[in-house]
Image (cartoon, grey):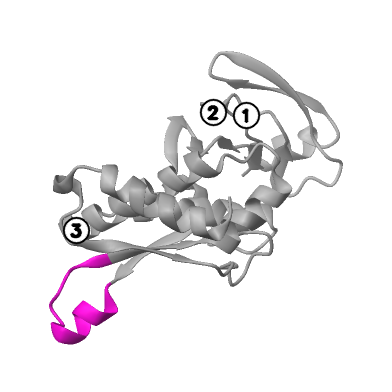
Amino acid sequence: MDFETFARRSEEILDEIPDEYLAGITGVEAHELREDHPHLGGLYTLGVCASDDLRLMADPEDTTSRIHLYHGSFAAVAKRDPSFDWEAELRETILHEIRHHIEDRAGLPDLRREDELALALARFRAGEDLPDGWYRLGEPFEDHAWSIEDDLFVELHVRPAELEALRGETVEVLLDGDVLEVEMPEDLRPGEFLSYPGEGLTGPTNATGDLHLRVL
């Protein structure tokens, strides 16, 4: 999708949304640039909902917002994903930013929390340091298990002697009624994560997340 079409469809999609959801939103603005994440390579910001600077200058107490969309970021994601649906992603991004606006005005943190967890998950996958137990802010799945997007984080609590016995062994992990056999490394250390690609949860698009075990 070229930039002119992108900008036009952005305004058309916003016009299709009922007015009651747009209270305080002054419009949508398309930008040609690519907005890279400041810390994680390959992660791009598709859109943001920010205070309308012009309105804010006139009234510091103003709570209006303007949606900003980055065509370059969309293009970067589309380049690496042949199945990228410009129209669907554009609509989803606009709705996402409207929800940010509504929740921010109402003082509700749910979507911000979801975004922060998604970012923390991306940082985890990139091998960055995170606060201990950060994944426990995810959705409770079972005892000592939490889901973030389609990834599943599971804590295995064992005594020191049991930890020693696990090293180099194949163990069975029971999750949601299913048994998964996993290999424990010889140099297993308490507190480290063991990740198993494709063994997490199946999402709405039938994509499967990863399983992350942490022996404590």
The disc label shown at residue 146, or none: none
Foreground residue among 111 and 143: 111
- Look at label 3 and name its amino acid: Gly
- Gap in Å between the C-alphas at discs 1 and 2? 6 Å
x, y percent for residue 23: 15, 56
| Mark 2 or 3, nearer chain start | 3
Q: Tell whether 32 sits left or right of 19.
A: right
Quarter of the view holding residue 91:
top left
Q: Residue at x 27, y 73 (%)?
A: 52
Residue occupied by mark 2: 203
Q: Residue at x 13, y 82 (%)?
A: 59
Instruction: Judge whether residue 62 is colored magenta.
Output: yes
Residue occupied by mark 1: 207
The region drawn magenta spans 52-65
Q: Residue at x 67, y 52 (%)?
A: 125
The disc label shown at residue 107, or none: 3
